[in-house]
Image (cartoon, helix red, strand yellow):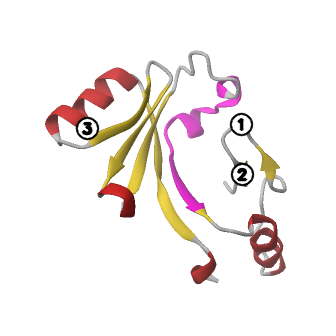
Amino acid sequence: MTEKMRFEGLTLAVENVTRSVEFYTQKLGLTAEVNAAPDFAMIRIGGNHGGTIGLLSVSGAGMERAEYMTTLQKHSIVVELSTADLDGLYEALRSLGVVFEQAPQDEPWDRALTRS
């Protein structure tokens, strides 16, 4: 099963995206691949063969789905995996008893699937 999935990165809910970007870029020397502060930023680790750290504002300024963030979600780490066949992986995992909040869906950034 794992050969069908690739690790993409992590997303952290943060109080201040700008301050977090400054830490990762100025203190750790990493690259901000996307900087859409105050809402979101993406830090690249390890070049094209590495992964990313997404920084999502807990206040969700301007974020369409932020109003649905629970307290638990605001203090969570999201592990991001990708696959060439999301629907097929979803069905295979469901057959193994994995429970999902909903079936795969199209999001503005990609096709996505969530498991709490």
The residue shown at (81%, 66%) is 87
Is residue 15 located in the magenta-colored stretch of the structure?
A: no
Q: Earlier in the sequence, mark 3 or mark 1?
A: 3
Say what secondary structure mark 2 lies in. Answer: strand
In the rendered image, the vertical position of residue 57 relative to residue 53, given as above or below: above
Answer few, some or many: residues within 10 Å of disc 2's Cα (few below 14, many 20 plus, some between 14 and 19): some
Task: Give the amino acid at mark 3.
Answer: Tyr
Residue located at (83% from left, 73% from top): 91
Residue that label 1 marks? 108
- Residue 48 higher or lower than 42, as above or below: below
Q: CA distance from mark 2 to mark 3?
A: 26 Å
Disc 1 element: loop
Inspect the image, locate mark 2, and give the three-letter code of the amino acid beneath it.
Answer: Ala
| Amino acid marked by disc 1 | Pro
Give the x, y percent position of residue 81: 57, 62
Quadrant of residue 22 within the rendered picture? top left
Can you tell which mark lies on residue 24? 3
Task: Name the residue rendered at 60%, 63% in the picture.
Answer: 82
Give the extent of the magenta segment. Answer: 66-81
Residue nearest the viewer, comparing 100 with 113 = 113
The disc, 2 or 3, on the residue closer to the chain's N-terminal end is: 3
Q: Quadrant of residue 69?
A: top right
Q: Is residue 106 left or right of residue 54?
A: right
Q: Which residue is mark 2?
A: 112
* Badge 1: residue crowd in 10 Å (few <14, some 14–19, many ≥20): few
